[in-house]
Image (tube, rainbow, N blue to C red):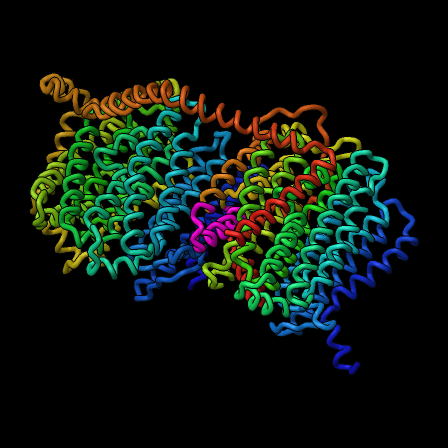
Amino acid sequence: MSLAQLLSHLRALPEMVLLAGACALMLVDLASKSETRRLSYLFAQGVLLIAFCATLFVLSESEGKRYYIFYGLFVSDLLSHVLKLFAFITVSAVLVYARPYLHERGLLKGEFLTLLLFALLGILVMISANSFLSLYLGLELLTLCLYALVALNRDSAASTEAAMKYFVLGALASGLLLYGMSMIYGATGSLLFTDIGPQTAALAASSSSMRTLLVFGLVFVVAGIAFKLGAVPFHMWIPDVYHGASTAVTLVIGTAPKLAAFAMALRLLVNGLPALAVDWQQMLVVLAVLSMALGNLAAIAQSNLKRMLAYSTISHMGFMLLGLLSGVVGGNRLNAVDAYGAAMFYTAVYVLMSLGAFGVLLLASRQGAECERLEDMKGMNRRDPWLAFLMLLMMFSLAGIPPMAGFYAKFAVISAVVQAGQLWLAVAAVAFSLVGAFYYLRVVKLMYFDDPAGVAVPAGGGSARWLLSVNGLALLALGLLPQGLMALCQAAIRSL
Amino acid sequence: MKTLYLLVPLAPLAGAILAGLFGRALGRAGAHTVTILGVLVSFLASCWIFADVLEGNTFNGTVYTWLTSGGVTLEIGFLIDRLSALMMVVVTFVSLMVHVYTIGYMAEDPGYQRFFSYISLFTFSMLMLVMANNFLQLFFGWEAVGLVSYLLIGFWYTRPTAIHANLKAFLVNRVGDFGFILGIALVLAYFGSLDYAQVFAEAPALAAPVTLICLALFVGAMGKSAQFPLHVWLPDSMEGPTPISALIHAATMVTAGIFMVARMAPLYELSATARSVVLVIGGITALFMGLVALTQYDIKRVVAYSTLSQLGYMTVALGASAYSAAIFHLMTHAFFKAVLFLGAGSVIIALHHEQDMRRMGGLKAAMPVTYWTFLLGAISSAGIPGFAGFFSKDAIIEAARHATIPGAGFAYLCVLACVFVTAAYTFRMVFMAFHGAPRYDAHRPPHESPAVVTVPLVLLAIPSVLAGWLVGRFLPVDSAWDFVVHGLVSLPFWLALAGIAAAAILYRRPSSLPKRIAMRLGPLYAVVERKYGFDELYAWLFGAGARVLGTGLWKAGDQTFIDGLMVNGSARVVGWFSGIVRLAQTGILNTYAFLMLFGILAGVTWVIWRFWS
C-alpha cells in the first residue's frame, strides 16, 4: 500500500478519533473516582470536540468532491460531513442535558459515556456507508449500544423490560433487513451502492424474474428502514422503549439516531436503488400516511409526556418520509434537491426540537420527582417561567406554528409534496398536523393556565439551562432565518 | 446608508423590547430612558435620511429575503423617497414629543413601562409601514399598528368602556382590513408580485381590474383612516390615554390610509372611478364629521371629530389627484393636531381628569403655556393665512375646485363649507375651555403642567405655525408669500373668520344663544348630536343581526353539528381509535412481532399482486 493510499484513509479521521477516544474513555473512567464523573465527562466532550474539528478539517480538505475509501465501503461527501457535524452537536448537547439527571439517580457511570460514544461511532459509520456491509455494521454497533443503554437502569423493571422488547424486535428487524439485502445482492451481485445503482437500472428496465427478486428485497429493506425510523406498522417498540427507558436514555434514542436513520434511508434508497423509486415511493406513501395518522391520533390519548412524545416522533417521521417520497416524479429527479433537502431540514429541526423537549423534561425532573406525566406540567409558568417559555417554544415548533423552525420545516416538505403533484398527500399532512397541534397546545395550556399541582419543585440551573435557552432560541432563529440551514441541506443533497 | 435605514425602525424596536420584557428590572426611569433614546436615534437618522433624499439620493432595495414560494418572494425591503422620508421624520418627531410628554402624563400610572413599550412598538410598526417597498411589509406594518392601537385603546383594561372601545376599533378595522387584504390578494393574483416597483410598472399595460383593486385597497384605508362610514371607531378610541390619542389616533396611525393611497398613486391614476369614490367619501367625512364636532362637549371627542374631518380633507386631496397636497396636509395636521390633543391632555390632567368643557372655562390665566400653544394650534387648524394649516388646506380646496372627475363639485362644496365649520368648532373649544368664567371645582384649582408636558407642546407648536412655509417643497407655487396674500382675498379666509366670529358670539361669554339655536333646529340638531345614529344603526344591524344569526348558528350549527357531530364525534373517533391502538399496544412482544410481519406480508402481497396483474 502506497503512502498516498494510506493517507487517503484519513478521510475517516472523525471515526478514528472517536474510536480511539471511546477506547481511551474506558481507561480514563477508571481514574475518575468522583461521583460527578467530571473527568470522564470532560474527556468525552473533548473527544467530541476533536472529532468535530476533524470533520471540519476533512470537509475543508475535500473541496466539495466525493471520495470512496476502504475499497468503496466508505463514502466521504458533503452530506456525510454535514450529518456528522449535526450528530456531534446533538450528542454533545445530550451529554450536557443528561448529566445532572443521571448523577442525581446514581446512573452516571462510565458505561453511559462509553456506550454513547460507541453508539455515535455506529451513527457515523451508517452516515458514510456505501455498502450493505458497512451500513449493517454501523447499524448493529448503534443498536447494540442502545439496547445496553436502555437497560442501564438495571434495577428498574420497566427499563429492563423495554430493553428486552427493543432487543428482540430489533433483532427481528435487522434479520428482515439482512434478508432484503441478500436478495438484492443475489439479483445484482454487488454490495456497493455505487454498483447496485446502475445494475438495478438495467434490471428494472428488463422484465426478468430478477426484477421481481429485487422488488421483494426492496420490501424487506424498506421494512428495516421503517423500523429504524419507527414508521407504522414497524413502530411498536417506540412507545414502550421511550416510556420504559430513563428519560436521559430516551433523549439519546430520540435524537442522534434519527440522523442515522435518515442517512440510511437516503443511502439505501436514493443512492442504492434509485431505479426502483416508483416502487419504494409507493411503499413510503403508505408508511407516511399511516404514521401521521396513528402517531397524531394516539398521542392525543396519552397521559404520559414521554409516551406522547414517542407517538409524536412516529408522526414526525411520517412527515419526514413525505419529503423522501416526492423526490422523483415521473422518472426524473428535478424535484430531488428540494424534496430531499426539505426532508433533511425536517430531520435536523426535529432533532433539535426533540432535544429541547426532552431537555426540559430532564431539567424539570428532580431527585425523586420525575417530570413525565402531563399533570407535572401544570402551572409550570408559575414555578419556572423561563423553562415554561422554552417548553412553549418547543411545543409551538413541534406543532408547526410560525415563526418557529418547525413551521418552516413542515412548509418546505409540504411545498415539495405539492411540487411533486401529490396534492392529496399535502392535504392529509396538513390535516394531521392540525390534529397534532391539539396535544402540543394542551401542554402549553397546562403550563400557563392551570394551577400547579403538588409541591413546587425548583428546577435546576447550570450549563444545561443555558444550553436549553440556546436550543429554544435557535429554533426561533431558524424559523426566522431558515435560508442558511436550508441552503446547507440542499448543498448536501446535491453532493449525493 | 443601508445601515442607517435599518437603524430607523430597529432602534424603537430595541427600546420596546427592553422596556417590555425587562421593564421591571429597568424601573420607570430606565424604561423611559431606553425608549426615548431609541426614538431619538430614529428621529436623528430620519432627519439625516430626509436631507439625503432632498439631495436626490433615493433607495429601493431588499434588505432580507424571508422566503421564496411558488415564484413569489416574500421579503423585507425599503423604499426611501421623498414621501417615505418625510413620513419618517413626521412619525419619529411626533413620537419623540409624545414619549417625552408621557413622562408627565402617565407619571402615576402603574402600567408605566408597558405604556412606553407599546408606544415604541407602535413607532417601529409605523416606520415599517411607511418604509415598505412591497405589499407584504405594508400589510405587516398595517396590522401591527392596528394591534398596538387595539392594545393602547384598551390600556386601562379594567374600565368597561375602554374594553368596549377597543373591541369596536378592532371590529371596524377588521372590515377595512378585509378589503385591504382582498386588494393585496388581487394584486398578487394579477401581477404575480408584491413589489411596488414591479406592480406600478406593469399596471398600465396589464389588463388587471385596477378599479376593483383600488376600491378594495381604499376600503382598507377607510378603516384605518376612519372615513365614512367606517369612522365610528375613532371617537370611541379616545378612551385610551391622551398621548395615544395624539400619537396614534390623530397624528400618525390614522394617516396610514392616506399614506397608502398616496403610495399607490400610480394605480389610482389609472382609475377615475376609484378616485371619484375617494373624493365623495372624503367630502362627506370632512363636512359631516365637522358638524358633529360642533355639538360635542367632551374636549377629546371634539378633537377626535375634528381629526375625522381633517382626514376627510386629505382624502379629498387624494381623490383630486393632489397627492402632494394630501401629504402636505398630513404633515401640518400631524403637528397642529398633536398640539391640540396634547394641550387638551394638559387641561385634562390639570383638572384631575375632567373632560367636559362645560366644567372648564377661564383656564387662560392658570395655564398660560397651554393656552398659547393651544391657541396657535387652533389658528393653524382654522386655516388663517400664514399658519401651517392654511397652506395645506387651501391647496386642497384649490385642487378640489379644479378637479374634473364626477363628484368633484360635491366635494368642493363640502370642503368649502367645512372651512367655516372647522373654525367654529376649534374656537368653540378655545373659548369654552380657556375664556369666560371658571366653571371647574374651585377647591382644586388647576395649575400649569410640568415641563415634560409643556416643552413638547412648545416644540410642536413651532412647526404647526411655520411648517407651511415649506409649501414650495411640495407644490408648484412661485412663492409662499404670494400664496398668503392670495389667501387673504379668497373665500375660505372669510369663511374661517366668520366661523371664529360665530364661535366668539356664541361661546365667548355665557349665553343662552347656543341652546336657543339647538331648540330651533330641533330634530336636525338631535340627529347631528347623536352622530347621525351610526352607532345605533350598526348596533342594530350588525349587533342585533349578528346575535340573531349567531343564535341560529349556535343552535343549529354549534350544538347539533359541531358539538354533537364534530367535537364529541371526533372525540369519540379518537377515543375509539386510541382504544384500538391500546388494544394493539398490548405490551406483549408477540403482538408487536406479529404486526411487523403483517407489514412485511402486506408489502409482499402488494408486490405479487402487481406482478401478476
User: Residue B249's quadrant in the figure?
Assistant: top left
Residue ID at (35%, 49%): B138
Image x and y of residue B63, in percent: 43, 59
Q: Say whether residue A19 is visible.
A: yes
User: Residue A18's quadrant in the figure?
Assistant: bottom right
Image x and y of residue B575, in percent: 57, 26
Please give left or right for residue A59 compared with residue B399 in the image.
right
Q: Is residue B384 magenta?
A: no
Residue ID at (25%, 33%): B231
Please give left or right for residue B121 compared with residue B516 in the image.
right
Camera-side residue: B573 or A20?
Answer: B573
Magenta region's main secondary structure? Answer: helix
Image x and y of residue B457, in percent: 34, 41
Q: Which residues are magenta?
A: A403-425
Residue ID at (60%, 45%): B602
Which quadrant of the rendered structure holds the C terminus of chain A?
bottom right
Residue A204, compared with residue A342, is above or below; it is: below
Q: Is residue A405 magenta?
A: yes
Camera-side residue: B179 or B487?
Answer: B179
